[in-house]
């Protein structure tokens, strides 16, 4: 069985991959998630995903031989602005206020490095998310749950954040942080399939 490495410490991505019964190592990348304002959001997401996978591959050195490294990066985009992860309550409030009562776009870049065939695949998924209109009181109450931190756009669709999301157009798992259909499509190009429960 091939050695699989998830270049992420995201609990959401870990749980999504675990459900297929795949054994994998978790090696978070040390890449600074710096956004290039001159690039479109999908390009930023793909670039960051690729940088994460490459950094982990280099760091693993000889132990990365013949391994399969999977990485992802999720970006929230609204009205020409990329929203990253809030570092404090003020940033979280600003982001939630900005997405309130509007549709925004979620991009997730995915990168797979297959060392056994010396291939690197990079792609992205896009979904539209509609957020309900929130009062300042509702926003503050949501922030107090602690959920907005370490989440692009300051919300988590699978937690308390599910109560503020009216609907999603496109891949739901993309909004969670790992677009499973896109990931499996990429894996199939390399000769693998999550449906088989092993890589």
Image: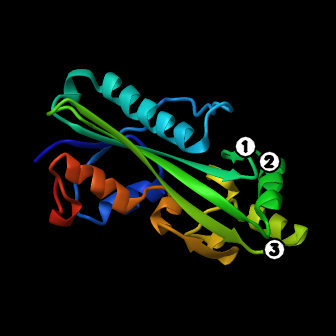
Residue shown at the point (83%, 60%) measured from the top left: 97
In this rendering, position of residue 46 left or right of residue 141 = left
Q: State the CA–CA distance, disc 2 to disc 1.
A: 6 Å
Q: Which residue is mark 1?
A: 87
Numbered disc 3: secondary structure: loop
Numbered disc 1: secondary structure: loop
State whether residue 59 is above or below residue 111: above
Q: State the CA–CA distance, disc 3 to disc 1.
A: 23 Å
Q: Which residue is mark 3?
A: 133
- Residue 10 x/y as whole percent: 48, 50
Q: Do the CB atoms of the residues marked 2 and 1 lie less than 8 Å apart?
A: yes
Residue shown at the point (77%, 54%) measured from the top left: 95
Residue shown at the point (46%, 64%) measured from the top left: 173
Foreground pick, 154 / 130: 130
Mark 2 nearby-residue class (10 Å; few <14, some 14–19, many ≥20): some
- Residue 149 visible in this rendered orientation of the protein: no
- Residue 111 x/y as whole percent: 37, 41
In primary-sequence order, the first of circles 3 and 1 is 1
- Residue 16 x/y as whole percent: 38, 62
In this rendering, position of residue 143 left or right of residue 72 = right
Q: Which residue is mark 2?
A: 91
- Residue 121 x/y as whole percent: 32, 39
Q: Which of the 4 quarters of the picture holds residue 34?
A: top right
- Residue 193 visible in this rendered orientation of the protein: yes
Mark 1 nearby-residue class (10 Å; few <14, some 14–19, many ≥20): few
């Amino acid at each position: 069985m091939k050695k699989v490495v998830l270049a992420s410490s995201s609990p959401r991505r870990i749980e999504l991959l675990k459900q297929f019964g795949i054994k994998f190592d978790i090696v978070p990348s040390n890449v600074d998630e710096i956004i290039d304002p001159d690039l479109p959001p999908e390009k930023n997401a793909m670039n960051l995903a690729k940088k994460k996978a490459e950094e982990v591959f280099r760091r693993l050195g000889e132990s990365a031989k013949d391994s399969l490294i999977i990485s992802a990066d999720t970006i929230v985009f609204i009205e020409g602005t990329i929203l990253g992860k809030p570092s404090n309550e003020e940033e979280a409030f600003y982001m939630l206020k900005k997405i309130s009562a509007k549709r925004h776009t979620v991009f997730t870049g995915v990168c797979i490095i297959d060392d056994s065939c010396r291939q690197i695949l990079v792609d992205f998924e896009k979904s539209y998310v509609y957020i309900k209109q929130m009062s300042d009181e509702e926003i503050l109450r949501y922030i107090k749950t602690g959920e907005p931190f370490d989440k692009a756009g300051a919300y988590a669709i699978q937690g308390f954040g599910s109560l503020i999301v009216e609907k999603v157009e496109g891949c739901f798992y993309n909004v969670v942080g790992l677009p499973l259909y896109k990931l499996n499509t990429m894996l199939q190009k390399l000769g693998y399939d999550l449906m088989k429960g092993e890589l």
